[in-house]
Amino acid sequence: MRISLMSYTFNPMTREGTMDAFTYLETVRYRYDLTTADLWNRTLASLEPDHLQALRMGLIERELDLVNLAVDGAHIWEEDPDTRDEHHRVALDHLLAAEILGAKSVRIDAGGGRDEREWTSEQFDHIVMRFREYAQHAHDNGYMVGPENHWGAATVPKEVKRLCEAVDHPAFGVLLHCKRWQGDQAAQGDEIVAPWTMHLHLTAALSDEELSDTMEMLRDKGYTGVWGIELGGATHAEAGVMVARVRRVLEEWRLADA
């Protein structure tokens, strides 16, 4: 069982120019002794093939698997048709980037209003159509794609479940942002969406008890993927604490099975 640390964790350093994609790879491999990378697209300097090929070699040299590429700026639904088309082009560019980088999964948000709690029929049908297209593309190239419970209707468990059932594709999944739910089923959100979880992010907002209980529930529901971490801007020490917390749970499991 492995751990990943999303590059968005170091977003302040990226903005300051003190961390780029390559120093991120060095950080997760040699500071935290991880064997995975978990990239936010804004960590990338560009989508130019030369840059992506160099980054791919950086992953290979450090023996890192890219478990997820999280894409901002490509969410599917926008009210303006021209914006929707532009986001579709951005999504396709990032699917190609994921293939060059060898990503195991890609997160593209569903979209819609940030304060909405339900997709309209028009929104839902368009989102389903696009995710089926992206999922088939991902299937043909050996990875998975899907949304995160990030904002709006995507933070309502029954809406995400409805979306998963409608897309109904083996290469479609959810990047589960644990405990990030709204509505009357918020407390059960992680469990409701567990069957479709392709990757996940744990956060420092979880108490030790919540962290252990959440990980145990997901394991019992059949999750066998990487235990991802996302912090909304952290120091190296703060990130190290969270990695240690997740490692402690995994070590407890290992000893219990010994």
Image (cartoon, rainbow, N blue to C red):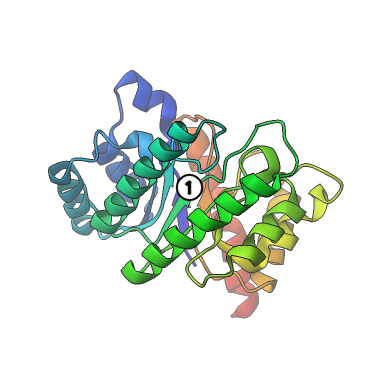
Q: Nearer the viewer, residue 3 or 175?
A: 175
22 vs 250: above or below: above
Question: Looking at the picture, how far across and down is residue 182, in whole percent?
Answer: 77, 42
Question: Looking at the picture, how far across and down is residue 26, in whole percent?
Answer: 27, 44
Count the marks.
1
Q: Residue at x 40, y 69 (%)?
A: 139
Left or right of residue 251, residue 184 in this image: right
Q: Residue at x 82, y 43 (%)?
A: 183
> Which of the image's four quarters has the C terminus?
bottom right
Q: Nearer the viewer, residue 183 or 153?
A: 153
Q: Residue at x 50, y 41 (%)?
A: 75
Residue corresponding to mark 1: 108
Q: Secondary structure at mark 1?
A: strand
Q: Nearer the viewer, residue 119 or 18?
A: 119
Report the amino acid beneath label 1: Ile
Question: Looking at the picture, how far across and down is residue 17, in whole percent?
Answer: 29, 22
Left or right of residue 189, residue 215 in this image: left
Q: Residue furthest right?
A: 184
